[in-house]
Image (spheres, rainbow, N blue to C red):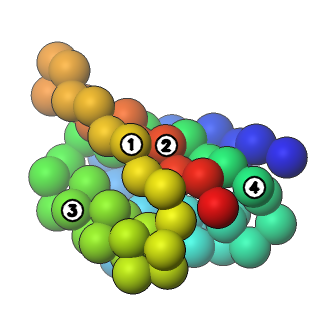
Amino acid sequence: MEKTLDLRGLSCPIPLIRTRDALADAAAVTIIVDEPAPRENIIKFAKAQNYKVESTVAGGEATIVIRK
């Protein structure tokens, strides 16, 4: 199952917590954030869990795709 989370406008730690919770029951999660801190924290978390991470930034928004 794949999920998409629109976490624009939220500050840490909320985006990280929602990402972690979504990964509990999804094989892949796509996250959209508009702040650098949540982007960095989500990527660090995913890599620490040995997930595959892809990230792109365009127009001030980052799209992060995490796969187990």
For disc 3, the marked residue is: 40
Q: Are marks 2 and 3 in contact (CB under 8 Å)?
A: no
Callout 1, which amino acid? Glu
Label located before the other in sequence (4 or 3): 4
Mark 4 residue element: loop
Front of the two marks 3 and 1: 1
Of residues 38 and 53, the one nearer the viewer is 53
Tell me where residue 64 appears, x and y as whole percent: 40, 43
Callout 2, which amino acid? Val
Q: Residues within 10 Å of mark 3 (few under 14, many from 20)?
A: few
Report, in whole angstroms, how far the alpha carbon at label 4 lies from the one at label 2.
11 Å
Label located before the other in sequence (2 or 3): 3
Report, in whole angstroms, how far the alpha carbon at label 4 lies from the one at label 1.
14 Å
Q: Are marks 2 and 1 in contact (CB under 8 Å)?
A: yes
For disc 1, the marked residue is: 54
Q: Residues within 10 Å of mark 1 (few under 14, many from 20)?
A: few
Of residues 30 and 13, the one nearer the viewer is 30
Q: Is residue 18 above or below residue 5?
A: below
Mark 1 residue element: strand
Report, in whole angstroms, how far the alpha carbon at label 2 lies from the one at label 1.
5 Å
Residue at image point 67% right, 49% down: 28
Residue at image point 38% right, 71% down: 47
Callout 4, which amino acid? Ala
Residue at image point 39% right, 81% down: 48
Label located before the other in sequence (4 or 1): 4
Front of the two marks 4 and 3: 4
For disc 2, the marked residue is: 65
For disc 4, the marked residue is: 27
Residue at image point 64% right, 61% down: 68
Q: Is residue 5 above or below residue 27?
A: above
The mark found on residue 11 in the picture is none
Tell me where residue 15 appears, x and y as whole percent: 42, 63
